[in-house]
Image: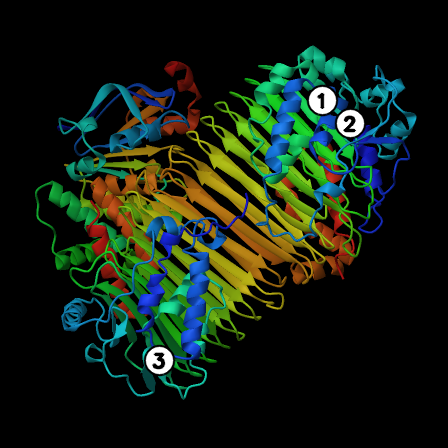
């Protein structure tokens, strides 16, 4: 196996993509410089392909072809379409912060509650009195090329702060609405929870009627101060021919609790990469998710969990239901640093294949440098259990119903882990919709 | 008395081996038939073939249920017609709440029979009734099907289903395996409470003990894939005394 | 078995810095000049007296090698190898072709005695089959094909094997005496283009074993090869080819030792196994190459490509290994499960101490119908070593009913080492059922304290726990090897505790 990086063919990264977009990208001076450098980095490396180990199973060059030109700012018509889409959201009772085609839409958004500050990313980037504003785009400890792309082209996002000790009642809901077709949308948002704060963050990716074939490139950067608690739910329901490449970078303080759940039912190509790092001791992270894939969908969940300090524990469980000719990819790496003694980390991935053409790739990795730890992972792939199917049929359930019941059970067990009732119901609804649409 | 189940000269293969070599058996309504026999005699095969488990090839013979060709029906059709197999090893189905499973199954059977779905309040009432009768705590039903149930609890869950679905033919596949005396007694009581003139039972067992609690009308002995002797309930006691060995040659 | 017992006694005294096998044999050695070019390849081929087709095969491989780059994806770190700064061939000088053991250079024979291997047929035959009526258990027999620095010096038991129809000879002899068989199978499991090290091996391989077991024959004894690297700066490029024809069975043991060196030594072997319908090949390895001194200098680089092709229906190939040596280990004994109902097994204990680096594992490729595979990997990391399990289990689209069970467990001794697990699980078929589990932990302090409190020393306690940890794998080794392996395991962990 030789590792020779393929040089991108010139037409794969249209050089004018950045040049065209440049003028409307918020931020001058150090921000503009950082964007240019990030794009140069992206252009030199190109879209990731299968010879890059982290993208081995998700060759974006093959799957995406090339990056679409950046979407224009939404006009009145677009905002109207977005509004209609918002009315159909399953998740209600949240404080919504809406990004339409990559631009914050104040008129469609709610005001933040007490204890919560909200700023537009574009405003922060253009605020020349803020000498460290460029740092917001610099967050890329991972060296990942798609994060570099996101840094170069992010047009907007929300920067949310939850004050020390604040516990806003309503979930903070970032809603991404795409209304245009054949475009790229790049956003980056931030959430900082102060010490002892508690909040719920929801991210939805939805499509307005008529929008298709777009690419969403999102990043969300989260910091939890000591003793903070964050519940996080992500629902990806993009158009069936859209692409969703999202990154989450999470840093956990001491004694924090972070519970996150991601459910993907939409998008032709999706990649969710979450980089979670324990920065303080005695913290706990529970990272779960489910990909429901059919037709020719390609869904990739890549989790990298850094136990950088001692005494933290983590539980990860990821499931996939794969039908037709779809493909599910799960990569989960747990890094235990040399001093991270008393780490307790467990990871489990299960793939359920429903058809002959379905494919699942799992790579659960352990990289362990400390010895006083308990780490383990498990992976299973298979079809529905014949003996369970027979039991249900012998009790009167016709074949299709028996299958549906078992698939529902498989999916349900994952969704059960969502603490918030209404969010759990929203996830259940999304799953049911997917199951019903199964031919 | 009309025939509920007629098995005529049934021959069944599993992979390369013929397990049933021409088995004939008739169960009438209102009767309890016990089938006894050593390991490998084909008892479980018979129950699986009646229920329609995949993996068994019928090479000859027929099975009629209330006069209809049972082998032509899918497993769920058979259930709707009134065939119930109480599994020897009931499976665990995590993620499927027992209550939900019971309701879905019951309604699926009713739908197949052209009856309407049972309303939720009626269903809950019926479940409550049955649970009380069988002394099953209702919150056991919130758990996944058989998840975390002891052997005795699993068997009782099978009896619960029998009481709920009201099948015409109940096949109890080694109900006593893995049960202690108390659990056995409870399960047997549940079964006895279901005996009616319209219902037939096939009780498959190794040991005579179960038949002290579920008293059969007819006892058959199986050996090497055939019924080699039939008689009244005393036959079971005879077997207890003399064992199965005497029948091994007869079958050959 | 005398050979093995003596080795065991020798091994008992080994510890990391005083590798007892660190002696050189003072014999004249005939070497090709340093460096690698076409002439080197021709030199080797000529020395082996090879037919033209073999030289052509080598040259093609060499030309391809020149276009390839060394792989860098494994988790091993080593100073850049200057391939031109090595000798690629070293044979002890011999005056004429050997007709019998008496003609072997006595120095060489003495080397083997030091290693605990006696080439004397009588000594090996002692302990051979006694009639069952005497009540004594049949003693297993081992045929030894002793390789001494790139050349097979002698082979024993030829007569017995010949009677059974089994061909067991150095590959250089097989190329001359059974060219049709060699041509048919060489490179059919590991093609010359496979990877950098396999290509290199294809160009410069100097010797190795060739085994052919004819249809229906159960090889009457276990076949074995001991070898070592002697000359400074020679690479060991062993090439082994084992074919089990329809319904045949063969068990092959590979174990090796190497002397102390200052410069690192390169070992790039290739092993190809082919099992036809209903055949079974059992390949066992106990590897104890020099791991480097207590500062991490020196030590063998072990880059090996081992692959088994379950070509026939119901065929079975199992790899069992105990790896305790080498400074760098890069090897993934694999099985291609081509034939319907075929089965692949991989049982491994990989121990690293000092500054050793191991990136090892297996690949089970499910192609045929109803294929099964089983992987049990136990890694133990101590000292400042890095121990990585890298495995691939894949089910092809047509691999209906594929089944795999994998358990890889790692034990860490001390907090300066690392244990890593990198499994790739790929299914393209819904009827495939793959289960994988992995755990990493250290030896429980409670357990250690309990043992110590009952009178065991700290080291004995560790040994006890480690033994329990590796038990599942040890039971798959042929008996003689299991004993040697157990001792080797405790020895390689000496100094790791406290």
Residue with the mark numbered 3: A160
Kindly identify which chain the residue marked by label 1 belongs to.
C
Res. C253 image quadrant: top right
Residue B148 in view of the camera? no
Task: State the image coordinates of residue A133 (x, y, percent, origin top left).
Answer: 42, 81
N-terminal of the two: label 1 or label 2? 2
Distance in Å between CA atoms under marks 1 and 2: 9 Å
Could you tell me if the residues under marks 1 and 2 are in contact, i.e. CB atoms within 8 Å?
A: yes
Could you tell me if the residues under marks 1 and 3 are in contact, i.e. CB atoms within 8 Å?
A: no
Q: Which mark is residue A82?
A: none
Distance in Å between CA atoms under marks 3 and 2: 72 Å
Kindly identify which chain the residue marked by label 2 belongs to.
C
Q: Quadrant of the N terminus of chain C?
A: top right
Residue with the mark numbered 1: C172
Res. B128 image quadrant: bottom left
Task: State the image coordinates of residue A233 (x, y, percent, origin top left).
Answer: 33, 67
Image height check: is A134 above or below C424? below
Secondary structure, mark 2, is strand
Residue found at x 70% / y 19%: C50
Residue with the mark numbered 2: C151
Secondary structure, mark 1, is helix
């Amino acid at each position: 196996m030789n590792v020779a990086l393929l040089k991108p063919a010139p037409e794969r990264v249209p050089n004018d993509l950045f040049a065209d977009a440049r003028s409307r990208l918020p931020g001058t001076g150090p921000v503009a410089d950082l964007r240019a450098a990030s794009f140069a980095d992206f252009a030199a490396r190109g879209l990731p392909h299968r010879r890059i180990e982290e993208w081995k199973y998700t060759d974006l060059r093959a799957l995406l072809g090339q990056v679409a030109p950046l979407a224009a700012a939404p006009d009145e018509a677009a905002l109207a379409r977005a509004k209609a889409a918002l009315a159909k959201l399953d998740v209600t009772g949240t404080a919504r912060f809406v990004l339409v085609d990559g631009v914050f839409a104040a008129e469609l958004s709610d005001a933040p509650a007490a204890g919560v500050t909200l700023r537009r990313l574009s405003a922060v980037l253009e605020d020349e009195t803020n000498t460290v504003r460029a740092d917001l785009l610099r967050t890329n400890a991972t060296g990942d090329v798609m994060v570099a792309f996101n840094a170069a082209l992010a047009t907007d996002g929300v920067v949310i702060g939850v004050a020390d000790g604040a516990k806003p009642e309503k979930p903070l809901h970032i809603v991404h609405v795409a209304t245009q077709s054949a475009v790229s949308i790049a956003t980056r948002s931030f959430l900082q929870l102060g010490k002892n704060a508690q909040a719920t963050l929801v991210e939805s990716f939805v499509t307005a009627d008529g929008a298709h074939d777009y690419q969403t490139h999102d990043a969300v950067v989260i910091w939890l101060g000591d003793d903070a608690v964050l519940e996080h739910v992500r629902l990806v329901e993009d158009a069936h021919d859209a692409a969703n490449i999202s990154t989450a970078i999470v840093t956990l303080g001491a004694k924090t609790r972070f519970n996150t759940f991601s459910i993907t039912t939409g998008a032709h190509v999706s990649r969710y990469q979450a980089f979670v790092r324990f920065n303080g001791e005695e913290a706990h992270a529970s990272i779960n998710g489910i990909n429901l894939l059919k037709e020719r969908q390609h869904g990739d969940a890549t989790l990298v969990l850094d136990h950088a300090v001692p005494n933290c524990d983590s539980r990860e469980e990821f499931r996939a239901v794969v039908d037709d000719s779809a493909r599910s990819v799960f990569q989960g790496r747990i890094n235990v640093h040399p001093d991270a003694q008393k780490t307790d980390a467990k990871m489990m991935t299960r793939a359920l294949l429903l058809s002959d053409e379905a494919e699942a790739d799992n790579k659960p990795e352990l990289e362990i440098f400390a010895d006083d730890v308990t780490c383990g992972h498990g992976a299973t792939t298979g079809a529905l259990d014949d003996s369970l199917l027979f039991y249900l049929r012998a009790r009167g359930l016709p074949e299709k119903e028996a299958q549906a019941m078992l698939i529902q059970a498989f999916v349900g067990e994952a969704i059960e882990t969502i603490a918030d009732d209404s969010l759990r119901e929203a996830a259940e609804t999304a799953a049911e919709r997917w199951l019903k649409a199964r031919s | 008395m009309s025939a509920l189940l007629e098995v005529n000269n049934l021959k069944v293969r599993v992979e390369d081996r013929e397990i049933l070599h021409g088995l004939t058996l008739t169960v009438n309504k209102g009767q309890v038939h016990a089938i006894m026999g050593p390991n490998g005699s084909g008892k479980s095969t018979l129950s699986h073939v009646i229920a329609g488990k995949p993996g068994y090839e019928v090479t000859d013979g027929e099975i009629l249920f209330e006069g209809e060709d049972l082998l032509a029906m899918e497993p769920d059709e058979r259930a709707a017609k009134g065939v119930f197999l109480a599994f020897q090893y009931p499976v665990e189905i995590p993620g499927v709440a027992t209550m939900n499973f019971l309701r879905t199954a019951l309604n699926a059977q009713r739908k197949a029979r052209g009856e309407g779905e049972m309303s939720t309040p009626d269903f809950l009432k019926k479940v409550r009734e049955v649970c009380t009768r069988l002394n099953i705590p209702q919150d056991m039903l919130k758990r996944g099907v058989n998840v975390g149930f002891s052997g005795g609890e699993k068997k009782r869950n099978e009896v619960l289903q029998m009481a709920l679905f009201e099948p015409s033919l109940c096949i109890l596949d080694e109900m006593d395996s893995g049960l202690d005396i108390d659990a056995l007694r409870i399960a047997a009581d549940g079964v006895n409470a279901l005996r009616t003139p319209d219902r037939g039972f096939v009780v498959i067992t190794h040991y005579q003990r179960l038949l002290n609690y579920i008293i059969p009308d007819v006892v058959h002995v199986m050996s090497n894939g055939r019924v080699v002797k039939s008689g009244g309930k005393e036959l079971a006691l005879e077997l207890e005394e003399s064992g199965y060995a005497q029948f091994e040659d007869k079958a050959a | 078995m005398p050979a093995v017992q003596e080795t065991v006694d020798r091994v008992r005294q080994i510890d990391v810095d005083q590798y007892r096998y660190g002696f050189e044999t003072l014999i004249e050695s005939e070497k090709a000049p340093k460096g690698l070019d076409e002439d080197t390849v021709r030199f080797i081929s000529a020395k082996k007296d090879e037919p033209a087709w073999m030289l052509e095969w080598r040259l093609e491989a060499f030309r391809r090698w020149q276009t390839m780059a060394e792989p860098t994806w494994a988790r091993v770190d080593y100073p850049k190898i200057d391939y031109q700064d090595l000798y690629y061939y070293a044979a002890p000088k011999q005056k004429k072709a050997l007709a019998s053991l008496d003609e072997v250079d006595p120095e060489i024979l003495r080397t083997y005695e030091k290693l605990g291997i006696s080439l004397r047929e009588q000594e090996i035959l002692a302990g051979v089959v006694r009639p069952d009526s005497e009540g004594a258990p049949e003693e297993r027999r081992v045929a030894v094909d002793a390789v001494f620095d790139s050349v097979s010096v002698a082979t024993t038991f030829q007569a017995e094997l010949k009677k059974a129809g089994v061909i067991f000879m150095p590959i250089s002899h097989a190329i001359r005496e059974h060219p049709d068989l060699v041509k048919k199978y060489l490179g059919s499991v590991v093609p010359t283009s496979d990877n950098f090290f396999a290509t290199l091996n294809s160009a410069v391989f100097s010797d190795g074993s060739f085994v052919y077991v004819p249809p229906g024959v159960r090889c009457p004894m276990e076949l074995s090869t001991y070898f070592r690297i002697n000359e400074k700066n020679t690479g060991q490029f062993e090439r082994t080819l084992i074919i089990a024809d329809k319904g045949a069975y063969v068990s092959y043991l590979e174990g090796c030792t190497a002397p102390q060196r200052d410069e690192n030594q390169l070992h790039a072997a290739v092993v190809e196994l082919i099992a036809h319908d209903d055949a079974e090949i059992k390949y066992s390895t106990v590897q104890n190459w020099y791991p480097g001194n207590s500062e991490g200098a020196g030590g063998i680089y072990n880059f090996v490509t081992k692959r088994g092709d379950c070509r026939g229906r119901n065929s079975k190939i199992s790899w069992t290994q105990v790896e305790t040596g080498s400074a760098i280990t890069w090897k993934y004994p694999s099985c291609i499960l081509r034939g319907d109902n075929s089965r692949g097994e991989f049982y491994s204990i990989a121990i690293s101490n000092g500054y050793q680096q191991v990136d090892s594992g297996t690949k089970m490729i499910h192609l045929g119908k109803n294929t099964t595979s089983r992987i049990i990997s136990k890694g133990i990391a101590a000292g400042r070593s890095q121990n990585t399990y890298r495995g691939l289990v894949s089910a092809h689209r047509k691999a209906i009913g594929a089944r795999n069970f994998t358990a890889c467990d790692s034990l860490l001794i001390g907090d300066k080492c690392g244990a890593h697990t990198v499994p790739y699980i790929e299914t393209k078929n819904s009827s495939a059922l793959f289960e994988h589990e992995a755990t990493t932990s250290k030896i429980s302090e409670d357990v250690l304290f309990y043992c110590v409190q009952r009178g065991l020393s700290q080291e004995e306690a560790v040994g006890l726990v480690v033994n329990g940890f590796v038990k599942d794998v040890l039971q798959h080794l042929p008996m003689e090897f299991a004993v040697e392996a157990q001792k080797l395991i405790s020895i390689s962990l000496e100094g790791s505790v406290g």
